[in-house]
Amino acid sequence: MSMLFTLALAGLAIASPTPIRPKNVTAQNITTLSQSVINGFTPYTWYASAGYCQPNATLAWTCGTSCDNNPGFKPIASGGNGNSVQFWFVGYDPSLNEVIVSHQGTDPKELDSLLTDAEIFRGQLNKDSSLFPGIDDSIEVHDGFKDAQANTATDILAAVQEGMSQYNTSAVTLTGHSLGAAIALLDSVYLPLHLPHNTTFKTTVYGLPRVGDQAFADYVDKHVSQLTHVNNKEDPIPTLPGRFLGYAHPAGEVHIEDSNEWDACFGQDNESKRCIVGDVPNIFDGNLENHDGPYNGIIMGTGC
């Protein structure tokens, strides 16, 4: 919880991300996913859920079903204290041939309080040029999310490099839920600046709040490959911080309907009622109980 107080004080590969997506596109730009495609998210959902679990000194997790459902996972490194620094882990999934990076989420009620605070400060993403070299000065992100990502960035980079070398893979997947999703999205901007150009990236996150301004969303659309952010029903967290504060989502939304249909929403902040912005036009229409899932039957943090 003190992590959130610190933040408060600080203030599928659905389509190719190369072009900037138009904003405010609606229902004709929505595709319903098949069950086989939905099931393809399941390993990453379990990894996001396992981000809540505290690793022990031997890099083993006592997190029940969150880990049991990816039984071949090979831990490489982990860290955080679940307090001032979110838990994180890096490992290798042999069935996917991917290095996996996962970040811990947080209590949705606490995150809701943080993100509805009037004092939502943004700062330059490249303020620390050693983390984000070459990023344009105009790109701004939430100060608290930026600080949280910086706390673990170099350790995660080292662990990913170790995993790629040890297991001879060039594939990296980032995942997380809630606050962990925000950190993972920033990692998806950070890691490509420091890893070989032939590295392939996938970012699959859940319950993602808005992380940065319009310039950040446009940068993500242009440079972050294979981003999917999954929103569950009337979860209000993905609608925060509000667009009136200058925040924007990148493209890549998948919205789970009340019917449990999964709809891929084209564009940034799609305003169709089949997407999160249209379904939850203000926080009073939201339901925080939807934040933890289920995501195709999986509740975040189960088994920890």
Image (cartoon, helix red, strand yellow):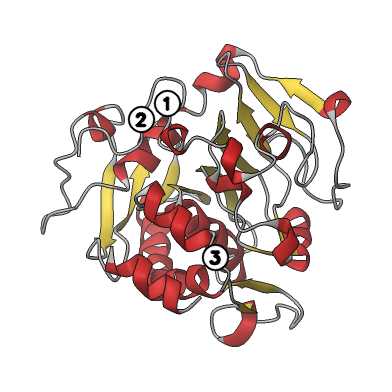
Q: Residue furthest front?
A: 284
Q: Position of residue 264 (x, y in %)?
A: 70, 29
Q: Position of residue 2 (x, y in %)?
A: 28, 69
The residue wearing badge 3 is 191
Amino acid type of the residue that numbered disc 2 sits on in the rendered structure: Ile
Residue at 21% from the left image edge and 33% from the top image edge: 303
Q: Position of residue 17 (x, y in %)?
A: 77, 47
Other residues around mark 1 within 10 Å, as few (<14) / some (14–19) / many (≥20):
some
Amino acid type of the residue that numbered disc 1 sits on in the rendered structure: Pro
Of marks 1 and 3, the one in the foreground: 1
The residue wearing badge 1 is 294
Secondary structure under tag 1 reads: loop
Quarter of image, res 143:
bottom right
Quarter of image, res 90:
bottom left
Quadrant into which the C terminus falls: top left
Relative vertical location of residue 149 with respect to residue 207 in this rendering, above or below: below
Residue at 66% from the left image edge and 19% from the top image edge: 33
Secondary structure under tag 3 reads: helix
The residue wearing badge 2 is 299
Other residues around mark 3 within 10 Å, as few (<14) / some (14–19) / many (≥20):
many
